[in-house]
Each structure stands twice: as structure tokens, then as C-alpha cells.
Amino acid sequence: MDFITDLPKSDKHDVILVIVDIFTKIAHFIPTTKAIIGAATTRLFLRYIFRLHGLPDDIVSDRGPQFISSFWNSLCKLLGVQTDGQTKRVNHVLEQYLRCTINYHQNDWFELLPFVEFAYNNSVHTSTKQTPFFANYGQHPRMDIQLVNHVKNPAARDKAQYLMEIHKELHEEIHKAQEHYKYYADQHRVQNPSYQIRDKVCLLRNNLQTSRPCAKLDHQRFGPFTILAKINPVTFKLQLPSTMRIHPVFHVSMLEPYQISPLRGERSSPSPPIEIDDHEEFEVEHVLDSRISRGRLEYLIHWKGYDISDRTWEPVENLQRTPIKETIVNLRSHVNPISHDWFRIRRNQCFHCIQSMEKP
């Protein structure tokens, strides 16, 4: 599911909602407007998709601004959301179809959209070796328009002739588009690396968002991560930190073999932080030491995926997640044990402090 936006106005529409069935490849092109919001997107989905196909098992989208409303978010939580790639490829094909058929002012695409959708769904796809119509319904739609000479209405005859010309032109453009994309893919196709379970790989940052302000200056890959399972020859499940909170299954195009850098001091990029309630959170790997600094308890933290030089002293209030608190409790008997001789009285309250074992 995706949107083609910023189109010239056509019958008050300036956006096309593109919905593609991953299995049968059947596509629906729905005209709408840029002002669409989450609830309106859901109404379009129910009107054009649900009544024909029922409720999908999953929804794949790029989660753009059209999906921000609480109603759509709640629906996506029930169905599961992934990032989209297939619909964007259909978008390129749709744009090429319209490019070849619309008028000079580009304001008649609304009228052409049903014919473009029909032509797309009635064309054989290379991946399925059949048309989306046949894959979805088990039969081909009737498409032969026979013109007869005794039609009394000239406008009807002209319209039928126009439809035949459009259908023929679209089929020619579909063939050209398929040949073009096949040639382009062949030129850029490379052999995928052969990964095995327990291999170390790096994850490319494509479609991954971090809290860093500039994507151009952000790390282009993260890791290393261990491969836990091989779902199929081109899909793998990775062992990710719990803080990343993303689906751990990735296509091979998102992975790179992990190689230890021969350059001194160079290290792989750490796992990206996530934002929870507008705050960055990182994963603690080890609690190494403790001290009293300016009257407050602090712990020396080694962050998962980071270098020794990135260790920091953190106040105890920054370590409120349950697993971290359990780790601190377990290590208190080994790291600078609590001295019960130390107390501090303030406003009739008694505070236990940890005696620092650091040497000056």
C-alpha cells in the first residue's frame, strides 16, 4: 500500500492510493486527495478493497503521514506493519502508463485510471507467470470490444473506439516497461552472498530510522549481528538487541558480511538507539563499577555495541528498566559492596550510600 502524490488536479483528485496483493499481484488504483487522513484512508480501504477481497492477513506500507491517526495505528497494530517495496515498483509502472496516455495538461488521469488498472491486472507478470486477474479469480475477464456499424449513437461508437485504442496502447507500454525493468535488473544483478546460521553480518540502514538528525551523516550499517535462522534462501532472522524493537527478519539485500576492520581503532557501528517517550534508550551490556559522586550513587556502564572508550558513569535514576535493576542488585556483593556504616540524614529521611572503592 502506497501513495502517488503531488499529481495535477484531475476531477478534484491529486493523489492515487496504490494497493497491491503480494500473492496474486492484483492491483487497485484509487483516486483521492492530498488532504486524506487516517480514518479516510480506512474508509477507502473498506470501500474499494474489503468489499472485494475481505480482510488481509497483513498490511505492508511505508507508514507515511497518511497513517498517523490513532485509528489507523490501532488497525496496523492488529494486522502488523512492515515496510513496503513491491507497491513502489507498481507505482513506477503506473506512472509510466499514465505518462503515455494522459493529455498535455495532465488533468485527465482520473478518467484513465480504471483502464490502466484493467490493463495492468490483465498482463502476465514474470514472477507468477500469469495475470493478476487469473491468479485472483481463476479466469480472464472479457475484454473483446466488437464495433458494429449499425450503432446509432455516434458518441457511443467514438467512446468504444477510444477504449480499444487505449487498451492496445497500454498493452504495448506494459511490454516495453517489462523489457525495460528486466534489462535494468540484469545490468545491476549480482550474486547474493551465501550466509549460514551463526554467521556475523552487518545490517544496512536502508529503511531504518535513528534519532540522529542528519541521515547523510549517520552510520550506513549497524552490527555485527548473529544470524539465528534461515527463513528461505534470501531471507534471514537476526539476533537484534531488544532496544531496536524492529522485526528481526531481513532480505539478503539488507545484509553485508561482517569483516573485522584491519585499521587500528576502527570499530563497527553500534546498534542505533531508539526513542521511547521522546527519550533515547541504549542497551546495557555490563555494570562494571559504582561510586558516590557529589552525593549521589552512580554506576559505570558498558553499553552494548559500543567501545570501551564510550563507557559512562550513570546515576541510578537513569537505570530504571527492570533487567538493569536486577543486574545492579546481583552485582552489589561484587562491585564496591554497600557499607552500612554510611548514612546521610536529610529532612528526617535516611539514605543508604555506596562507599566508593576508587583510589585517588
Image (spheres, rainbow, N blue to C red):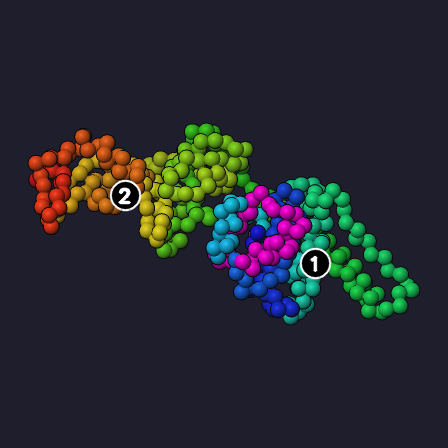
Residue of label 1: 114
Q: Is residue 329 left or right of residue 247?
A: left
Residue topped by disc 2: 320
* Magenta span of residues: 39-68
Report the disc number at residue 136: none
Q: Is residue 94 magenta?
A: no
Q: Earlier in the sequence, mark 2 or mark 1?
A: 1
Between residues 30 and 107, which one lies in front from this camera angle?
A: 30
Q: Is residue 60 magenta?
A: yes
Is residue 40 at least partly visible in the picture?
yes
Report the amino acid beneath label 2.
Gln
Dot 2 falls on a residue whose secondary structure is loop
Residue 108 shown left or right of residue 39 in the figure:
right
Residue 73 pos. (x, y %): 49, 52
Residue sitting at x 61%, y 54%: 46
Q: Is residue 175 above or below residue 225?
A: below
In this rendering, the answer to whether 187 lies above or below 93 is above
Magenta part mainly helix, strand or loop?
Answer: helix
**Does residue 233 appear in the picture of this structure?**
no
At numbered mark 1, what does the secondary structure look like: helix, strand or loop?
Answer: helix
Nearer to the camera, 265 or 72: 72
Rendering coords of residue 281 (x, y %): 32, 46
**In the image, what residue type sits under mark 1?**
Pro
